[in-house]
Image (cartoon, rainbow, N blue to C red):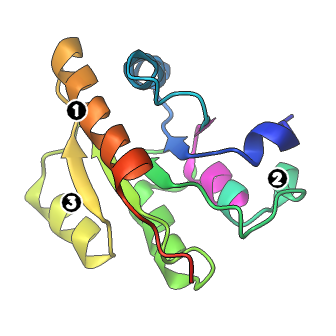
């Protein structure tokens, strides 16, 4: 059962089904003090329930959006491109920054992601130290540097 308090403090929504990638991402963000307000969801449907305050997340406020969504493409129940499509189709979530974070280097997936309005497409390095550095850069930019639209 989600915690209402933690759901109200989300800076990063991590949409990832692979437990090893979840752990690596959380460790990499924590190394750089960026992991304090991360919410992890394990599939595309749960991501949309969280963002649109449905199901077990019905008590959330939809205007309390995460600072950034880190979105894997290969997800159970609903793939990442469909999640992105639905985020961009709704005016309440359209402006949330979305970063695809995936192992997929397929040019068609990259093009499809940008066509749907992704803000950034990042291929996960397989080396853990390189992965930590990429997560530091992504987290620092989207959580600390980027100034989101308030309107």
Mark seen at residue 134: 1
Q: Write the start and end of the magenta stretch as one range.
A: 39-49
Q: Is residue 72 magenta?
A: no
The x, y position of residue 119, in whole percent, is 30, 65
Residue identifier under label 3? 109
The residues tagged by marks 2 and 1 sit, at their Cα atoms, a distance apart of 30 Å
> Considering only vertical position in the picture, is 135 above or below 89?
above
The answer to whether mark 2 and mark 1 are in CB contact below 8 A is no
| Mark 2 residue element | helix
Residue identifier under label 2? 57
The x, y position of residue 44, in whole percent, is 56, 52
Of the two numbered discs 2 and 3 on the same chain, state the one appearing first in sequence.
Answer: 2
Visible residue check, residue 73: no
Q: Please give left or right for residue 78 compared with residue 113 in the image.
A: right
Residue that lies at the very extreme toward the left in this rendered image? 107
Residue 114, by quadrant, is: bottom left
The residues tagged by marks 1 and 3 sit, at their Cα atoms, a distance apart of 20 Å
Foreground: disc 1 or disc 3:
1
> Considering only vertical position in the picture, is 136 above or below 99?
above
For image coordinates 47% across by 23% down, the residue present is 26
The x, y position of residue 76, in whole percent, is 53, 44
Quadrant assignment for the C terminus: bottom right
């Amino acid at each position: 059962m989600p915690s209402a308090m933690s759901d109200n403090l989300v800076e990063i929504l991590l949409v990832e089904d692979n437990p090893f990638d979840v752990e690596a991402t959380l460790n990499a963000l924590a190394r750089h003090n960026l992991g304090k307000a991360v919410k992890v969801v394990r599939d595309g449907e749960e991501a949309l329930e969280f963002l649109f305050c449905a199901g077990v997340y019905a008590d959330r406020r939809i205007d309390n959006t995460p600072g950034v969504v880190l979105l894997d493409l290969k997800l159970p129940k609903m793939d990442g491109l469909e999640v992105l499509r639905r985020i961009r189709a709704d005016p309440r979530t359209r402006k949330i920054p979305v970063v695809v974070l995936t192992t997929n280097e397929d040019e068609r997936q990259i093009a499809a992601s940008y066509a749907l309005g992704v803000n950034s497409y990042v291929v996960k390095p397989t080396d853990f130290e390189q992965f930590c550095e990429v997560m530091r850069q992504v987290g620092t930019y989207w959580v600390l540097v980027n100034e989101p639209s308030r309107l």
